[in-house]
Image (cartoon, grey):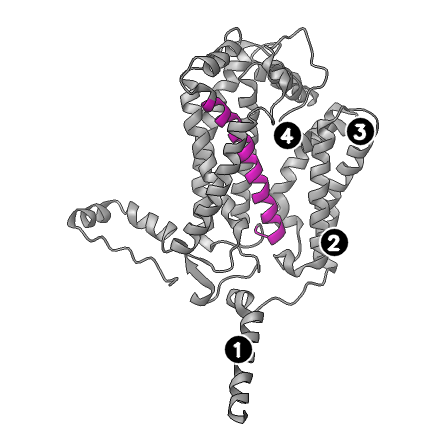
Amino acid sequence: MSGEPTYVPKSPLAQWFESRLPVIGLVHSSFVAFPNPRNLNYWWTLGGILSFMLAAQIVTGIVLVMHYTPQSGLAFASVEHIMRDVNYGWLLRYAHANGASMFFFAMYIHMFRGMYYGSYKSPREVLWLLGFIIYFLAVATAFMGYVLPWGQMSFWGATVITSLFSAIPLVGDSITTWLWGGYAVDNATLNRFFSLHYLLPFMIAGVVVLHIWALHVHGSNNPAGIEKKTSKDTLPFHPYFTVKDGFALVCFIAFYAWFVFYVPNYLSDADNYIEANPLQTPVHIVPEWYYLPFYAILRSIPSKLGGASAMFIAVFVIAFLPWLDTSRVKSAAFRPLYRIFFWLFVACTILLGYMGSQPPEGIYVIAARFLTVYYFLHFFVILPLLGRYERPKPLPDSIYDSVLGKSGKAAVADTTQMQIREPGQ
């Protein structure tokens, strides 16, 4: 059931086309007959969900661009025009705005799953790096998109983040001026961000193709963290995983639709419904929720250069996980100590997100500093030392044994014992 691709065109037209451009055969080998580890669980459905959300963001974004005006004096009014006058414009905008949050929600789960099961380890380092590039491009795309409504939080968020580059010695002011297109966040800045926000999703789509290509070179990792050895370890992608992925996608779409139709503004800031005013700073400048952990790291360090450096290092250190984690065992299921520190890291990240949403004062700053220290300790101290001193549990002989080994052997043993007892009864 998990053999090599066997697509054979039946009609003469299909044979003629396939001999010249084997697109259907490529799709068949990649998404129908492609052998996947038989022990993949629902945590492996996030890739398909992310692909769907990226497509949804591109489609809704293209339609929104048809009605948006990238001009500082008209941008806010054009967004209101979309909401009030364009047929189903409110649906398009809410689907696009909440779609960004859904994309990052799925992506963070996807990343944490990769960390838990060691999906970044050999031979999948390039796969992990491509995934990080997708994440980084998504961060940049979402930030630029958040500026486009030209509300108070959009304007001041852009001002705060772009001003960080001015802390770079010697060239900081020049970089900031280039980003702004002048000496302040204004019309030129909006045009730059609009242009890049429209372009980057297509770049993300291109990297996604490379990501899938790299995935198909060595195949998916699995909860046991061991490589497939025989055909018994795998199942074809269709129908086993298409059905599972499809069910997970339907559940995720229902979750997504609940936000769009019932609480469309729950994840946004009320200040962004006030037109941008360079002369009035909001009381509390807060970015979107998916930036909050890194925003807390930025604010926890008094130095502007130090805070900006720590924030960017906190993002880019994720790309170096394949070399920071020195353990040869991939899955946390067989690494009891790593499993504890993994969940501590997840808790640390969530708490940093909460600290980033609070005013930068008192206990929130102190707590953010402790959490920032632990965040970096996890990558630069804990992971390297665990690889050296941790004693993992024994690994199963194969993926097949990890699925059916204990229960399967027990069932066989029980059946054998029953057969032995029967003659004497």
Q: Which mark sits nearer the N-terminus, 2 or 3?
A: 3
Label 2 and label 4: CA atoms lie apart by: 32 Å
Nearest to the eye among marks 2 and 4: give it.
4
Give the residue displayed 70% in from the left and 56% down from the top. 387
Residue to which mark 4 is pinned: 289
Residue tagged 3: 365
Pair 1/2: label in front = 1
Marks 1/2: CA–CA distance: 41 Å
For residue 92: magenta?
Answer: yes
Measure how far apart labels 4 and 3 are at the Cα level.
18 Å
Q: Nearer the viewer, mark 2 or mark 3?
A: 3
Q: Which residues are magenta?
A: 91-119
In the visual, does 334 lie left or right of 23?
A: right
Q: Amino acid at mark 1?
A: Val
Rounded to the nearest angstrom, the CA distance separating label 1 from label 4 is 51 Å
Choose between 329 and 404: the one closer to the eye: 404
Q: Secondary structure at mark 4?
A: helix
* Among numbered discs 2 and 4, the one appearing first in the sequence: 4
SS assignment at label 1: helix
Is residue 203 in view from this perspective? yes
Q: How many marks?
A: 4
Mark 2 Cα within 10 Å, few/some/many (few <14, many 20+)? some
Helix, strand or loop at label 3? It is helix
Which residue is nearer to you in this view: 367 or 219?
367
Q: Which mark is residue 412?
A: 1
